[in-house]
Image: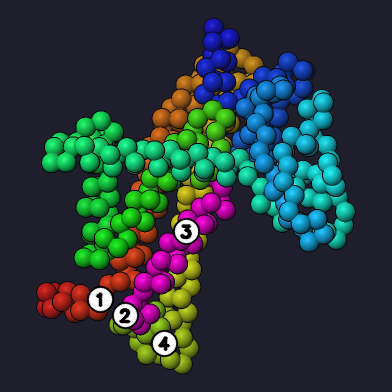
């Protein structure tokens, strides 16, 4: 019974390195295992052994050596231990030069970058198939993969873009659909054993939030900026002698992308940590009673994370749509609303 429980746990969480550590008599370190999973890396590690790690390309640029490209396996010796190579070493997941004073820029294809490439290829494959379905079934009911994704696309259009942006929604719909499916697919792929934690990387979520921020500011009309620097309905003494409200509104412009960044990053990372912590209890207590309970709770959390994966993609998308709508909203809309109230 215990063997089956451990097997299920290992398959669901990808804890093959943990099993190898137990075989070698090493003490199990849950913090190290969790950090290994949620952090980015120059290797894609699946299990211990000569064939359990996939090397990734290292691309470095420095003023003295120019561009250097090599495999990350160069940092492994014959005993599969990390070692320095050609004046570089990997420390805490980062490649640093051994010589002091050297400036090296790392453009390497890390695990998260490789996972994003895979998710983009998957997205292209899926939606090219959906497009072909529309070409084949023109004027007919959707079939196959088209029938699965069409309701989702219509939901984003009818329940997210149109209510929050209004008549100008078509300009922003491609971005909203792209951001929704990119986040959702990467959230789902991150739940597979040995997968990368793409949306649990704050650099990725920050980049997505910056895209939303730039699109919002570029398309903002004069009424948007007027609302920030001359907020209607606010006493003059809060705007002219001491510009309290303009400062508060301007701070709000930058806190919106910050909230988008932290919300997605924190929720996805927290889910991974909880699941891995539950599995760690099996190896900490080594009890036939704790093992099944840990697996059951971890399976429950896995199903909950499936919902969170979709929910976080939806929240990021609808908040982006709300920001776009506030930026392009016309002034007469408010006047009409006041007339209706009167």
Q: Could you say where residue 172 lies in the image, as x and y percent from the top left?
A: 32, 61
Query: Residue 330 shows which numbered tag?
Result: 1
Q: Which residue is mark 3?
A: 209
Q: Which residue is mark 4?
A: 239
**Mark 4 near mark 2, Cβ–Cβ under 8 Å?**
no
Predominant secondary structure in magenta?
A: helix
Relative to 230, does residue 252 appear above or below in the rendering? above
Q: Which residue is more in the foreground, 176 or 3? A: 176
Task: Kindly identify the residue that appears in the image at 20 percent across and 79 percent down.
Answer: 332
Circle 1 SS class? loop
Mark 2–mark 3 Cα distance, whole angstroms, equals 23 Å
Q: Could you say where residue 125 lies in the image, as x and y percent from the top left?
A: 39, 38
Residue 324 in view: yes
Q: Which residue is mark 2?
A: 223
Does label 4 or label 2 sit earlier along the sequence?
2
Q: Is residue 167 left or right of residue 120?
A: left
Relative to 261, does residue 116 appear above or below in the rendering? above
Category of crowding for the residue at label 2, using alpha-carbon neighbours closer than 10 angstroms: few (below 14), some (14–19), many (at least 20): some
Does label 3 or label 1 sit earlier along the sequence?
3
Task: Kindly identify the residue that appears in the image at 74 percent across and 34 percent down.
Answer: 73
Category of crowding for the residue at label 4, using alpha-carbon neighbours closer than 10 angstroms: few (below 14), some (14–19), many (at least 20): some
**Mark 2 near mark 1, Cβ–Cβ under 8 Å?**
yes
Q: Residue furthest right?
A: 99
**Mark 4 near mark 3, Cβ–Cβ under 8 Å?**
no
Q: Could you say where residue 181 lies in the image, as x and y percent from the top left?
A: 38, 45
Mark 4–mark 2 Cα distance, whole angstroms, equals 16 Å
Mark 4–mark 3 Cα distance, whole angstroms, equals 29 Å
């Amino acid at each position: 019974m215990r063997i089956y429980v451990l097997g299920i746990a290992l398959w669901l969480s990808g804890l093959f390195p943990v099993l190898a550590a137990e075989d070698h008599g090493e003490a199990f370190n849950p913090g190290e295992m969790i950090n290994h999973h949620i952090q980015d890396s120059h290797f894609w590690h699946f299990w211990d052994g000569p064939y359990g790690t996939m090397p990734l390309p290292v691309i470095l640029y420095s003023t003295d050596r120019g561009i250097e490209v090599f495999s990350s396996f160069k940092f492994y010796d014959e005993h599969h231990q990390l070692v320095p190579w050609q004046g570089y070493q990997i420390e805490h997941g980062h490649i640093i030069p051994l010589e002091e004073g050297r400036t090296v820029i790392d453009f390497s294809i890390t695990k998260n970058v490789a996972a994003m490439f895979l998710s983009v290829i998957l997205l292209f494959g899926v939606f090219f198939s959906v497009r072909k379905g529309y070409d084949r079934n023109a004027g007919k009911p959707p079939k196959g993969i088209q029938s699965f994704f069409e309701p989702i696309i219509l939901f984003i259009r009818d329940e997210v873009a149109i209510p929050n942006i209004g008549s100008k929604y078509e300009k922003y719909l491609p971005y909203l659909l792209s951001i929704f499916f990119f986040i959702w697919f990467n959230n789902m792929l991150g739940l597979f054993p040995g997968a990368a934690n793409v949306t649990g990387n704050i650099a990725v979520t920050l980049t997505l939030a910056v895209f939303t921020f730039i699109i919002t500011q570029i398309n903002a009309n004069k009424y948007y900026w007027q609302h920030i620097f001359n907020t209607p309905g606010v006493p003059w003494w809060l705007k002219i002698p001491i510009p309290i409200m303009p400062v508060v509104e301007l701070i709000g412009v930058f806190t919106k992308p910050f909230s988008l960044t932290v919300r997605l990053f924190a929720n996805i990372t927290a889910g991974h940590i909880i699941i891995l912590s539950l599995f760690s209890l099996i190896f900490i207590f080594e009890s036939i009673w704790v093992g099944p309970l840990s697996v059951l709770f971890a399976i429950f959390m896995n199903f909950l994370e499936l919902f969170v994966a979709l929910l976080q993609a939806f929240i990021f998308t609808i908040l982006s749509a709300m920001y776009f709508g506030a930026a392009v909203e016309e002034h007469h809309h408010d006047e009409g609303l006041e007339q209706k109230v009167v």
